[in-house]
Every structure is written in C-alpha cells, then in structure tokens.
Image: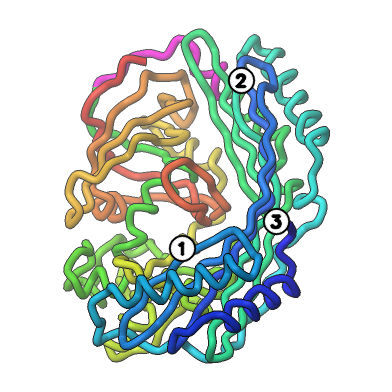
C-alpha cells in the first residue's frame, strides 16, 4: 500500500469520525523498503517490506496516551481510537500537558526521487556484482547491504494541523575482508545515484589492502585524524544534551553551561533540516515547523532546542524539535551540521608528522555522562602516519576520551560532508584532526 496524501487524508477522516476524545492526533507513517544483502562475495538475501501504520493519540482531562494499528477497516480504526482513549483514562493527570497545536505553515523540501523509491532488485544486484568484482581484483571478500525505498510521515490533529512528507531513501555499506585486515565504506542518500557505489567499493578495498599485516603500536595519546564516519558516531552522543528538558532536569553535560565557552573556538554546530545534504521532514513529532538553530558558535553553547512543553517552561519559543507525545526525552536536534574548512583529507594527512588515521569507530559506550567520557574501538582501517604520509596499518585500539576535551583539541578540519556510520543518525560533519587523543589499550586484531 502506497501512503499518498489523499489516502492519509482519508484515514484521518475515519479517525476523526470514530474518536470520542477531547482532542485527537493521528500520526500516519508508511514505508516501502527493499534490501539486498551480500557476504562471501555472494548475494544471499533479497527482502522487501511495505507497511502503513496509524498511531492515534487521545487527549482527555489533561491525560494522554496513544495506540497503533496497521489495519484500516472501520472496525479496526474505531478500536484503535477507543484503545487510545481508554489508555489515556488510566494515566495520571499532567498539569503541564498542552492542547494540540493548530494549523502550521511548513517550508517545502524536495527529497523524493521516484527512481530510488522504485529501484528494482535487478538494479541492486547488478550494482553489487560490480562491487564483488572489485573485491576479487585484490583477493578480498566483500560483505554488505544495498537498500532503497521510500518513507512517508503524515501528522494530523483535530485542531486543523495537517502535515505530510515523503522521501526516498537509499544506503550502501560494504566491508572488504582480507586475511589480516579489513576496510569499510558507507553512504546514504535520498537519491541512490548519490551513493557513488564504485567509489565506496574502491575505498573499502584500498583500506583493506593498505592495512594488511597490521603492526602493533603502543597505547597512548596521539594526534588522530578522524574521518567523518568516526566524527559522526561520536557527535551523536551529544544529541540529547542539547535538549531543553535534559538541561532543565540536569541530565545534560551542558547543564549550567549555556552561553558559556565549552568547546574550542573553531567549533561551530547547528541543527539544520534544510541543509541540502540533510534528510527528514520539515516538522517534528508534534507537527511544529523545524527551525534552524545555532547550537555552538566559536565554541560557545548559544542555544538549546525545545519542544512546545519545554519551551513554555523555559519562557521561550519552541524550535520544532519535539518527539511524538507522550515521551520522556523531550526533544533533540537530529539534523546536525558541523562547520569545517575547505581542506582535503590529503592536506590534513600531509600536515601530520606523526599520528593515526581512523576510518570508523564501533561499540561506543558512555563512561561519564557529565564529562562526556566515551569508550569504544577503532575498526576497519586504522593507519600510522609519519612525515605526512600513511605508512602502514596498525592493530586496532580501545579509546577513552572526553568528547568535550576532544572538541577543545581540534587542530584542523576538512570539508563537511554527509556521513553515515553505525552508532548515530546521519550528520554533515568534517574530517577532524585532534591532538592528544587517548588510546587506552590495544585490541587483538
């Protein structure tokens, strides 16, 4: 079932017909998603999924709750409306609960490409075959995924709010495996042509071949060049810290630090859903228009993001970053853009007398939420740099590093680009050269 605007309107009409709540909200989402998976230089899985879900939120007597269904006959929609109202009646009253917002005006964003949304299994298979052939050139084994499809978000309420966004999505991830090394590359985009799959395959293969027979380097503090995927996965652990509710409840590392210089003077961060390399809807989980927000300027924490309820408590305006209600998190920026410089990765490497180049990180965990100390490991391409050149692969490290301290030690940055990893949502971030990054121990591979 394709969730068109017309169908979404019709489904909400049924919700309004059957809901007996004081106020009613309906979040209607659709996904059409196909995935081709390969390993051991062979395609071994192709799956496809189509689904549409209605999530109804009932508001009654300062209580709210939601219920969901993926059945759209009249009885099922009546039942989900009754379930949401019954669940709301079981909740304690929330004196801070706001009425649902009225109609809003949204800035248009065009993120739908029909070719990507309807990409055939044959097209994905032919693309993967080229990647497998590239692996064979260097006697490597390729594994990864190639997915494509589309997502739809629609949000309505009984006070006239009506929001709809459709977006095509694609992802290619590949790991090239050698006897003693591996290389990795990944990219996502709203248009599958943006993935540049041949480039990703070549990048992963070069990392795997250049890191063969990795050498052992002692743990310690090193200058490190973090490629965008590594930067992104670390920055993702800041998202909830920039939420107004997290600061109010003193769960954030930025508590009592707003309008203070927390990071290095060359750090500038904003949340910007309208950036051409970003994705997502121009409205949040409450239906409020997303605003561009400068979070950090010259190292100073300038602003937080706010849902409607948190904004009212703080005496400010909502920024369009709320999650669907009810939720315990409040809000977070999800379209991070970190400003950088117009330097290439080659220039940054050339400027480094001794240091390490890190492709990506994994198994990242938070050690101290207030100092923002993280631990994790390097993976799929870690290299020793000497005299401005990548010399050889090294065995992977575990790191223990404060993200706040890290962002006070950034010496150089590259051109920001859309990055994809495994630990966070996509961001637009640069390569970063960081001094005295703490690698605490070696791994065995």
User: Label 2, on which residue?
Assistant: 39
User: Could you tell me which residue is drawn at 57 percent across and 52 percent down?
Assistant: 418
- Left/right placement of residue 195 relative to residue 211 reads right
Q: Residue furthest front?
A: 75
Q: Earlier in the sequence, mark 2 or mark 3?
A: 2
Count residues near mark 2 (Cα–Cα under 10 Å), then give few for <14, some for 14-19, many for 20+: some
Q: Residue 258 lies in what quarter of the image? A: bottom left
Residue 366 forms part of the magenta stretch:
no
User: Could you tell me which residue is drawn at 62 percent across and 15 percent down?
Assistant: 40
Q: Position of residue 363 (x, y in %)?
A: 34, 35
Residue 199 visible within the image:
yes
* Residue 334: image tag: 1
Asked if 182 appears above or below 263 in the picture, the reply is above
- Left/right placement of residue 304 relative to residue 183 reads left
- Quadrant of the snapshot with the C terminus: top left
- Magenta span: predominant SS is loop
User: Label 3, on which residue?
Assistant: 168
Tell me whether circle 2 and circle 3 mark residues in contact (CB < 8 Å): no
* Start-end of magenta stretch: 207-218
Q: CA distance from mark 2 to mark 3?
A: 26 Å
User: Could you tell me which residue is drawn at 71 percent across and 64 percent down?
Assistant: 3
Tell me whether circle 3 and circle 1 mark residues in contact (CB < 8 Å): no
């Amino acid at each position: 079932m394709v969730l068109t605007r017309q169908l979404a309107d019709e489904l909400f009409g049924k919700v309004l017909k059957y809901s007996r709540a004081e106020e009613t909200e309906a979040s209607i989402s659709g996904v059409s998603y196909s995935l081709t998976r390969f390993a051991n230089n062979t395609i071994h899985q192709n799956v496809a999924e189509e689904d549409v879900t209605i999530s109804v939120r009932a508001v009654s007597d300062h209580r709210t709750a939601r219920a969901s269904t993926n059945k759209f006959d009249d009885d099922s929609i009546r039942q989900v409306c009754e379930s949401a109202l019954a669940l709301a009646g079981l909740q304690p009253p929330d004196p801070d609960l706001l009425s649902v917002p009225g109609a809003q005006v949204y800035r248009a964003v065009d993120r739908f490409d029909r070719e990507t949304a309807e990409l055939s299994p044959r097209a994905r298979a032919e693309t993967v075959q080229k990647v497998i052939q590239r692996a064979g050139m260097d006697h490597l084994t390729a594994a990864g995924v190639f997915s494509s499809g589309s997502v739809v978000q629609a949000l309505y309420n009984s006070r006239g709010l009506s929001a709809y966004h459709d977006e095509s999505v694609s992802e290619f991830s590949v790991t090239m495996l050698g006897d003693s090394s591996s290389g990795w590359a990944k990219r996502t985009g709203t248009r599958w042509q943006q993935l540049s799959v041949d480039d990703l395959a070549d990048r992963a293969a070069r990392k795997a071949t250049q890191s063969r027979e990795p050498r052992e380097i002692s743990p310690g503090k090193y200058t490190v060049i973090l490629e965008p995927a590594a930067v992104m996965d670390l920055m993702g652990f800041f998202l909830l810290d920039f939420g107004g509710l997290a600061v109010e409840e003193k769960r954030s590392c930025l508590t009592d630090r707003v309008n203070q210089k927390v990071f290095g003077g060359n750090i500038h961060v904003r949340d910007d859903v309208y950036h051409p390399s970003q994705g997502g809807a121009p409205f949040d989980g409450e239906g409020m228009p997303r605003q561009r927000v400068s979070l950090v300027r010259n190292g100073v924490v300038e602003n937080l993001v706010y849902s409607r309820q948190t904004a009212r408590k703080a005496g400010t305006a909502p920024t369009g970053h709320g999650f669907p209600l009810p939720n315990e998190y409040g809000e977070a920026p999800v379209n991070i853009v970190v400003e950088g410089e117009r330097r290439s990765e080659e220039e940054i490497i050339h400027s480094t007398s001794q240091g390490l180049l890190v492709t990506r990180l994994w198994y990242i965990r938070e050690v101290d939420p207030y100092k923002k100390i993280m631990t994790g490991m390097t993976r799929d391409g870690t290299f020793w740099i000497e005299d401005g050149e990548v010399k050889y692969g090294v065995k992977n490290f575990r790191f223990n590093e404060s993200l706040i301290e890290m962002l006070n030690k950034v010496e150089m940055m590259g051109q920001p680009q859309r990055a994809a990893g495994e630990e966070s949502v996509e961001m637009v971030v640069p390569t970063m050269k960081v001094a005295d990054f703490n690698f605490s121990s070696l791994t065995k591979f």
